[in-house]
Image: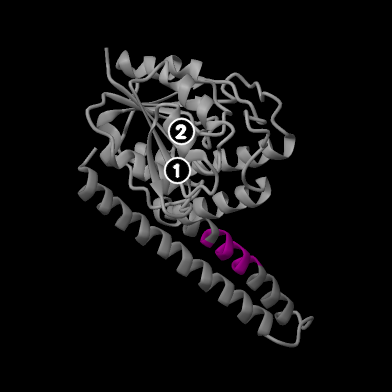
Amino acid sequence: MPLITAIVPAYNEEIAIGSVVIRTSEFVDRVIVVDDGSTDNTAYIAEKAGAEVIKHPHNQGKGAALKTGFQVMHETDIFLTIDGDGQHNPQEIPLLIKPIVDGEADLVNGSRYLNKKHHGTPIYRRMGQKILDSTTKINTGLKITDSQSGFRAFAAYTVPAFMFSKTGFSIESEMLMDAAANNFKIMEVPVGIRYNGTNGKIHTKNPLKHGIGVFVKLLQDMEFRRPLYYFTIPGIILISIGLILGLYSFGQYLDGQMLSLMPTVLSGLIGLGGIFMTLTGIILHSVAGMIRSIKYGAK
């Protein structure tokens, strides 16, 4: 039987963390709770429930908590991440583990939406998640139905691939990007969700602020991972706009309907800006390709 480790990032989850640790322990050999600077009894309760607890001196974000958990893993074959607020069902852990045991996947993503069941997800939240899913798809090329899931299983050999450059909640998408860059086999399995968890909270962050924050981080990643989308496509659009406006305004000037060439000049500047963006995207795309070839080898 493979040795399985669970990593539980937690911040002020004293109500739910004990249950999460106890129920998760039924399916894994080791539970590591990373207490990310909690000001309540999260660490104390997690330890009493049987978890190994690592404490951050102050709150650093979910990405930092996961990074710490990944760094202390040893002698394990499979590991999984599960949130500490009780929204995930530990009884579904075998569903995530099985594809890795069977050699069908390197990473298994627990998806709340794989079967198109939204489990009572508020409409505004699901719309935001769809935007994040689409942006993650552009960055990774993966068709993922739940890019923000914190319930995942990994083969142990995947650990070195994850860079953890993000400290906050955008870490979920970043991990998928790192996995895609390493050509890992990624599979999704359907899982349930409880938005009120066991601690009575819907979410520890304002959903609008959280969604915008993650979206901005994804756009920043797109700048480096998909420069053709970030620079070249907008550049081509600007070139087209500049050309159309320039021809129109110059025609108006020749017909005497416009007394100044200033609109034509401004249109030309728009076109030049588009050319600059297009070339920037092409250059960055080439550089990114060379970096990937050096870092990961020709694949």
Tell me whether circle 2 and circle 1 mark residues in contact (CB < 8 Å).
yes
Q: Which mark is residue 35?
A: 1
Q: Amino acid at mark 2?
A: Ala
Q: Residue at x 67, y 69 (%)?
A: 245
- Horizontal side of 126 relative to 181 (left or right) equals right
- Describe the element under mark 2 as helix, strand or loop: helix
Residue that label 2 marks: 46
Residue 243 part of the magenta segment: yes
In the rendered image, the vertical position of residue 155 relative to residue 42, given as above or below: above
- Horizontal side of 85 relative to 125 (left or right) equals left
Q: Quadrant of the N terminus?
A: top left
Judge whether residue 292 can be spotted in this image: yes
- Residue nearest the observer in this picture, 208 or 197: 197
Rendered image quadrant of residue 260: bottom right
Rendered image quadrant of residue 199: top right
Callout 1 crowding tier (Cα within 10 Å): few <14, some 14–19, many ≥20? many
Number of labelled discs? 2
Please tell me whether mark 2 or mark 1 is closer to you in this view. 2
Q: Amino acid at mark 1?
A: Asp
User: Residue 231: x and y, percent?
Assistant: 48, 59
- Describe the element under mark 1 as helix, strand or loop: strand
Callout 2 crowding tier (Cα within 10 Å): few <14, some 14–19, many ≥20? many
Which residues are the magenta region?
235-244
Q: Residue at x 55, y 65 (%)?
A: 239
User: Residue 152: x and y, percent?
Assistant: 44, 28
In the rendered image, the vertical position of residue 84 relative to residue 284, given as above or below: above
- Horizontal side of 141 relative to 262 (left or right) equals left
Q: Quadrant of the C terminus?
A: top left
User: Residue 81: x and y, percent?
Assistant: 43, 31
User: Residue 101: x and y, percent?
Assistant: 31, 15
